[in-house]
Image (spheres, rainbow, N blue to C red):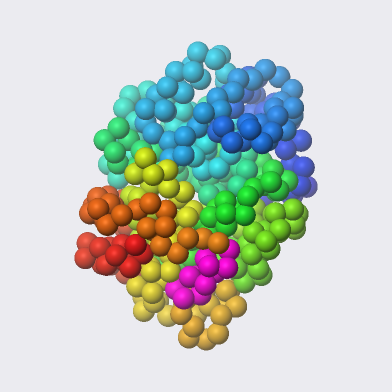
């Protein structure tokens, strides 16, 4: 089956999970620490994974949506006490972020906040225990990403980024996504779409990553695989292609992200609301596409081509229509966000690493207006 070497080896195909035992052996993992969430355990995916582990293992199945520094501290202690010598991240972005953070703190110690990308902490991040990432959604791309996102004790949703946080191997088995509900399929799929579009538009120069972004966008939207996956969750071809689009989105965003992610990260720190990152991205994306429409016509023209839009069509309007077609809520107020949340969301967006990747400058007033439109 295909093995793609870009940032990290990725075993990608139907049935790829059967390679887990061999992968662990290749990384000299004698006892694996599985990090996952309650839903994965409940639907039986955890059992499908552990039955492919030949040796000993421990399981933590309590990952929270948008994991916190407090949970990182707790699970790091469990990992150290377990005697495990490697980590297996199973799930969506939250489980992978938590697994990366546990690996970081178990091997480095100190204060988590000191490793944040916005405070110059990336250079402090060295090697972590061997990490195998197994996605059960098609969207975050965390399995091949240099980053992780954790809500710190001070309430800031911080980005941590280092090549040393890239999993040693990713096992991408689209069969593990066959039972994903339509709304979660839609939300995670729009996360991948947002990764591709924002990576394309950020001014950073990285032609290979930009090219991968166009390809991923064309696969998910232009070729219609996202809609097909939402409409029929048992469509194996659609699941395979969305797994690839997710993978491509993460390879693309090594180039950077933008205001959509800055706002989504800021809103995601509202822990009580338990907002889904992909849903937030989908809601914010049309508004930022309209805002950035005059930033780079050459890029927008090719984005239209990859989305099968007519020349001169409004990309923001097309994204809004796509959201409607796949069942994404149209407004922030539909998912519990209120006007009172606006000031803190804008405040934290301006501090977010993704803010610096916007296609053109975005001011506080611009963010306030976009929040108002999205509400």
* Magenta span contains residue 372: no
Q: Residue at 53% of width from left, 49% of height from top?
A: 140
Report the front residue among 60 and 180: 180
Residue 320 is at least partly visible in this image? yes
Residue located 69% across and 43% down the image: 176
Residue appearing at x 37%, y 58% in the figure: 333
Vertical position of residue 250 compared to residue 130: above or below: below
Q: Is 77 displayed left or right of 158 in the figure?
A: right
Give the quarter of the image for residue 287.
Answer: bottom left
In percent of width and height, residue 112 lies at 34, 31
Residue 197 vs residue 183, the one in the foreground = 183
Q: Residue furthest bottom?
A: 311
Left or right of 3, for residue 99: left
Residue at x 56% of width, y 80% of height = 309
Q: Is residue 350 visible?
A: no
> Residue 146 versus residue 92: which sits nearer the camera?
92
Residue 213 coordinates in the image, percent (x, y): 54, 63
């Amino acid at each position: 089956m295909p093995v793609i070497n870009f940032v990290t080896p990725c075993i990608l195909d139907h049935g790829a999970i059967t390679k887990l035992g061999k992968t662990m052996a290749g990384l000299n993992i004698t006892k694996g620490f599985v990090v996952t969430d309650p839903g994965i355990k409940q639907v039986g995916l955890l059992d499908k994974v552990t039955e492919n582990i030949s040796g000993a293992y421990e399981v933590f199945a309590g990952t929270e949506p948008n994991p916190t520094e407090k949970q990182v501290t707790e699970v790091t202690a469990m990992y150290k006490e377990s005697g495990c010598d490697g980590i297996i991240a199973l799930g969506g972005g939250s489980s992978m972020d938590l697994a990366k953070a546990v690996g970081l703190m178990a091997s480095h110690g100190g204060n988590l906040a000191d490793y944040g990308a916005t405070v110059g902490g990336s250079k402090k991040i060295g090697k972590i225990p061997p990490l195998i990432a197994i996605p059960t959604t098609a969207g975050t791309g965390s399995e091949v990403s240099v980053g992780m996102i954790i809500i710190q004790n001070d309430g800031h949703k911080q980005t941590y980024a280092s090549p040393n946080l890239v999993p040693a191997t990713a096992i991408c088995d689209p069969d593990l996504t066959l039972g994903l509900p339509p709304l979660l399929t839609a939300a995670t799929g729009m996360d991948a779409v947002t990764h591709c579009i924002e990576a394309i538009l950020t001014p950073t120069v990285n032609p290979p990553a930009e090219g991968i972004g166009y390809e991923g966008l064309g696969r998910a939207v232009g070729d219609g695989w996202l809609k097909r996956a939402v409409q029929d969750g048992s469509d194996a071809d659609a699941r395979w292609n969305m797994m690839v689009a997710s993978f491509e989105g993460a390879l693309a965003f090594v180039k950077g992200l933008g205001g959509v992610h800055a706002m989504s990260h800021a809103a995601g720190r509202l822990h009580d609301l338990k907002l889904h990152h992909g849903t937030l991205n989908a809601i914010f994306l049309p508004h930022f596409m309209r805002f950035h429409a005059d930033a780079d016509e050459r890029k927008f023209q090719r984005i239209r081509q990859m989305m099968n839009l007519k020349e001169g069509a409004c990309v923001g309007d097309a994204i809004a229509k796509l959201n409607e077609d796949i069942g994404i809520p149209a407004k922030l107020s539909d998912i519990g966000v209120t006007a009172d949340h606006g000031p803190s969301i804008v405040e934290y967006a301006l501090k977010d690493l993704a803010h610096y990747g916007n296609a053109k400058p975005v001011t506080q007033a611009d963010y306030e207006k976009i929040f108002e439109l999205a509400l």
